[in-house]
């Protein structure tokens, strides 16, 4: 029979630990273990503050989370390419995990014809057979002028929708082959029904350069994004599979301050109604071949093809002849869908109605005490990764 009198110190320490944990109040409760939340947690820990990070999902990292399939780091929630011209942010993330040399150079597939993106001399050669910048510029101006004259005949001085805006910017050939179908699948609406401001400018390069981004730095963390988010969470307590809003009073008692990165309308019980989002469905497949499409990202720009693009994940981290060393590959087809309650929200619908609705929620958020709202869902805006890290750095730690 076990005699507790023989081990009095053990039980005193054991009981003390239970009481300590029950009474512990953190400086910050971070709701959401996405990139904004984990970066804030890192900063708080560096400032000597205690953090508890919670998330509804069973993993950290939010939408940058990677899962390992056949020794390939699969971007479960879609392609994430880190890019920035902010040297401070680039040095910061590389101080946590080294980044590789990946350069985003997507391909567009239209009726079996392949075109380089963004629009550059390679695209114009593939589209029209032009070989010099002067020839490409002349062709672009001809098509822009055609669009201008067509609107003038209708008595239209300013573009009324995305289609008219795109025609004025890039002309009919590129619009119809590379923009129209893809955009309508992405937004679930015809381009004539979408506001012009969505596509106020299009990148046009009169050089043979397939690098999609203009930023000075870009790459993927070596070993996947989980290595980055794990480093950012070092020293913080983490609980997964818990819903903050399902037991808000309990979680509020755990910390002096709340950092909330979930949906802002859900935080306020949808009192003004639901903000609208576009969602994405992924169809992921492991194939017994080493190389499926030869590129990480291929967009399918025809309206009749239901998916918007195919991602081949190994190309984010494996280059050249090394691609063939792994005899398997993993691809994901992406289907853009209308968001419904219960689905993952991805892209805010930035029209006038939703912006006005968000401003009403934002005003409520400003009145909250000891609650910080930040990140894509809480601010109802699309964030690239570097700006969301910068956003976490801009918040005062107190």
Image (cartoon, rainbow, N blue to C red):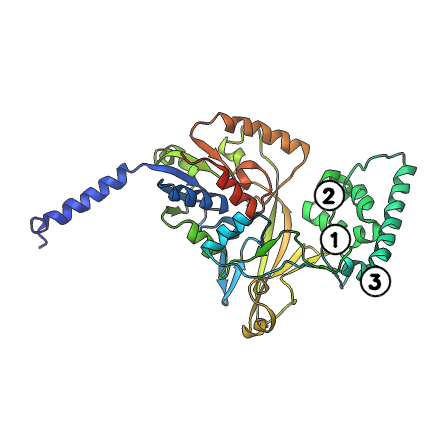
Residue under numbered circle 2: 199
Q: Earlier in the sequence, mark 3 or mark 1?
A: 3
Q: State which quarter of the image contains the N terminus.
A: bottom left
**Foreground of the two, 104 or 131:** 131
| Tag 1 secondary structure | loop
Q: Residue at x 91, y 42 (%)?
A: 149
Residue under numbered circle 3: 131
Number of marks = 3
Nearer the viewer's eye, disc 3 or disc 2? 3
**Compared with residue 306, is residue 291 higher up or lower down, i.e. above or below?**
below
| Tag 3 secondary structure | loop
Q: Residue at x 50, y 61 (%)?
A: 222
Q: Earlier in the sequence, mark 2 or mark 1?
A: 2
Rounded to the nearest whole Å, what is the CA distance between mark 2 and mark 1?
18 Å
Rounded to the nearest whole Å, what is the CA distance between mark 3 and mark 2?
27 Å
- Please state the horizontal and vertical placement of residue 38, each as a whole percent of the image: 45, 46
Residue under numbered circle 1: 303
Q: Quadrant of residue 46?
A: top left
| Tag 2 secondary structure | helix
Could you classify mark 3 by the number of other residues whose Cα lies within 10 Å: few (under 14), some (14-19), or many (20 or more)? few
């Amino acid at each position: 029979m076990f005699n507790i009198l023989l081990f009095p110190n053990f039980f005193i320490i054991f009981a003390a630990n239970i009481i300590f944990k029950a009474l512990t109040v953190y400086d910050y409760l971070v709701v959401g273990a996405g990139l904004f939340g984990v970066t804030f947690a890192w900063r708080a820990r560096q400032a000597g503050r205690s953090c508890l990070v919670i998330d509804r999902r069973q993993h950290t990292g939010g939408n940058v989370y990677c899962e390992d399939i056949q020794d390939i780091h699969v971007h479960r929630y879609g392609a994430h390419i880190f890019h920035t011209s902010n040297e401070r942010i680039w040095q910061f993330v590389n101080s946590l995990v080294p980044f590789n040399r990946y350069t985003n150079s997507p391909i567009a597939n239209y009726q079996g014809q392949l075109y380089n993106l963004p629009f550059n001399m390679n695209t114009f050669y593939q589209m029209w057979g032009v070989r010099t910048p002067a020839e490409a510029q002349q062709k672009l101006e001809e098509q822009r002028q055609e669009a201008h004259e067509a609107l003038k005949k209708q008595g239209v001085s300013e573009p009324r929708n995305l289609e008219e805006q795109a025609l004025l910017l890039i002309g009919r050939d590129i619009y119809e082959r590379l923009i129209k179908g893809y955009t309508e699948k992405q937004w679930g609406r015809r381009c004539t029904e979408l506001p012009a401001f969505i596509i106020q400018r299009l990148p046009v390069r009169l050089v043979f350069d397939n690098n999609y981004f203009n930023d000075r730095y870009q790459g993927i963390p070596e070993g996947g994004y989980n290595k980055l988010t794990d480093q950012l969470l070092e020293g913080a307590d983490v609980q997964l599979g818990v819903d903050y809003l399902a037991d808000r009073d309990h979680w509020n008692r755990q910390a002096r301050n709340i950092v909330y990165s979930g949906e802002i309308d859900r935080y306020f019980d949808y009192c003004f109604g639901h903000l609208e989002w576009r969602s994405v469905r992924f169809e992921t497949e492991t194939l017994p071949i080493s190389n499926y499409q030869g590129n990480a990202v291929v967009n399918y720009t025809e309206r009749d093809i239901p998916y918007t693009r195919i991602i081949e994940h190994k190309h984010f981290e494996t280059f050249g002849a090394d691609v063939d060393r792994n005899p398997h590959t993993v691809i994901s087809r992406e289907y853009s869908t209308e968001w419904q309650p219960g689905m993952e929200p991805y892209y805010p619908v930035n029209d006038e109605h939703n912006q006005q609705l968000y401003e009403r929620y934002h005003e409520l958020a400003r009145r909250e005490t000891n609650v910080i709202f930040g990140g894509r869902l809480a601010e109802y805006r699309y964030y690239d990764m570097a700006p969301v890290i910068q956003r976490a750095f801009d918040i005062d730690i107190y």
